[in-house]
Amino acid sequence: MHTGSYIDGAWYQPKNDRLIRNFNPANSSEVIAEYPAATAECVARAVAGASEAFKTWSKVPAPERARVIWRATEIARGRVEEFGRTLTTEEGKILAEGCGEIKKGISVLEYYAGAGTRLAGRTLPAEGRDVFTYTLRRPLGVVGLITPWNFPWAIPVWKVAPALVAGNTCVLKPSEITPNTAAHMVEIFEEAGLPKGCLQMVVGYGDDVGQAIVDHPDVKAISFTGSTATGHKVYAAAASRGAKVTCELGGKNAVIALADADVDAVVASVMNGAFGSTGQRCTATSRLLVHESIVGQVTEALVAGAQALKIGPGLSEGIQMGPIVDEQQFTSVLSYLEIGKSEADCLTGGGKVEELSEGYFVQPTVFGGVAPDARIFQEEIFGPVLSICTIKDLDEGLRYANSVRYGLTSSVYTQDIYEAMRFVEGIETGMVHVNEPTVGGEAQLPFGGIKDTGVGDKEMSSDGLNFFTEEKTVFINFDRGTKRDFNR
Ligand code: NDP
């Protein structure tokens, strides 16, 4: 296993008293790795190396760059189980979810490898006679990529792959909580023959290396995923020096279940959305707004489902929900459970799992009778906690669903196409589902939120590629010998 940072084609650990301590959240006494954190000087070296590498990488024809991504894809395909185990060991989600995330990243790699032959500009008509006008897409230069711990493989992949295929060079700062999974991503590119300096990884703290990337004048763009509080700071700092920025931030996603909803489908969807990946997905279902005619039936099934979940270390056989990622998140989720108990009815869960005290295990929790102005309804908790609120109709559901500052994803359950379309029109989220869970994203589809969840371009799809390029508009005059009218 590689540890430390990866700069100019070599694994590297600086001298620094501030350490990275990588724990297994299922057993917090198990230290996976401990080493000095990267520093702002490491960032300076990484950016200098990436600037040098840009001079040649940006000139490599895009289809040839894409071949490196294809080779990396094939290498990853052969190591799914190994990478999934690393992910589960440091992040906590169960192995099936860990391997699922690796496979999702492989689909993203495939998509962007294909983009090497589709880096298209536009051909448009010119006003002048005998003038040919078109656009070209060019890479930006060195780009800074800052990622969170909850998708430690998929998110670095969906930033690095489009950035590289477009001809940029990257300085990646993964979350210091989950650096080993990101290290695997570096390994596949290294083995695939990516030239040195094209992908630099600095493993350090946000207030030091993260800030140094954001502030570095030679970093032309910042792509950030993380909390809204940090994202807004990053956006302001990077934009103020003229860098291009995109930020994908927090969520508080709702499912609305109307009177005619298929109750079994609602329950299956919300079980997965609320408790899958221990509720630590930006797309998790944290609110269920359910019609008064079915609220009893749905709530009863969800409570039974939550109580039946098998909780434990994600690498163990038969486990359905793993731990919270670290002590800080664990404390934060537990404090929200206390807030919830003072605001609503705690129908199941509500605390830590006492018999699993060696790790950060929280009971899957369902709160009923939640008022729309309750803190557990409004604030992102980022744990296996569901708030249920009763509604009379779609209009009330939309009003409550839209009352939060976030706008990532949402879902409605109904058999009525008119109500479904009214939901699609009225809901304030960047992604909308009908009769399916709030979770999930696909490589070819734009991914991201609105309101306080997203600033800047969306990710994945052609949008993800466009972010890492700038467009040049070209005018070519071929009216040999003719006088042109420049005042036209
Ligand atoms: P944080 O905002 O705490 O951290 C995200 C990254 O930013 C980390 O690598 C962090 O480093 C770094 N960072 C912290 N401070 C700075 C700074 N001043 N300058 C630059 N970088 C900095 O988020 P979490 O890691 O806790 O991730 C969870 C959050 O991510 C949730 O809110 C979740 O909703 C959101 N998220 C959003 C997604 C989306 O697509 N909308 C997808 C996935 C997650 P360090 O760890 O050292 O603090």
Image: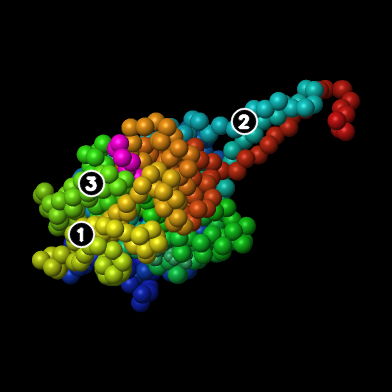
Depth check: give the residue in front, 381 or 36: 381
What residue type is disc 1 on?
Leu
Is any atom of residue 159 visible in this view? no
Where the C terminus falls, by quadrant?
top right
Q: Which residues are magenta?
A: 255-261
Label 3 CA crowd tier, 10 Å (few <14, some 14–19, many 20+): many
Marks 1 & 2, CB-CB < 8 Å contact: no
Q: Mark number for residue 298?
A: 3
Q: Is mark 1 within 8 Å of ligand 1?
A: no
Q: Quadrant of residue 421?
A: top left
Q: Earlier in the sequence, mark 1 or mark 2?
A: 2
Q: Nearer the viewer, mark 2 or mark 3?
A: 3
Disc 1 target residue: 347
Relative to 485, is 205 above or below? below
In the displayed structure, 99 sits above or below 5; it is: above
Looking at the rendered structure, the kind of residue marked 3 is Val
Q: Which mark is residue 122?
A: 2
The alpha-carbon separation of the residues under discs 2 and 3 comes to 51 Å
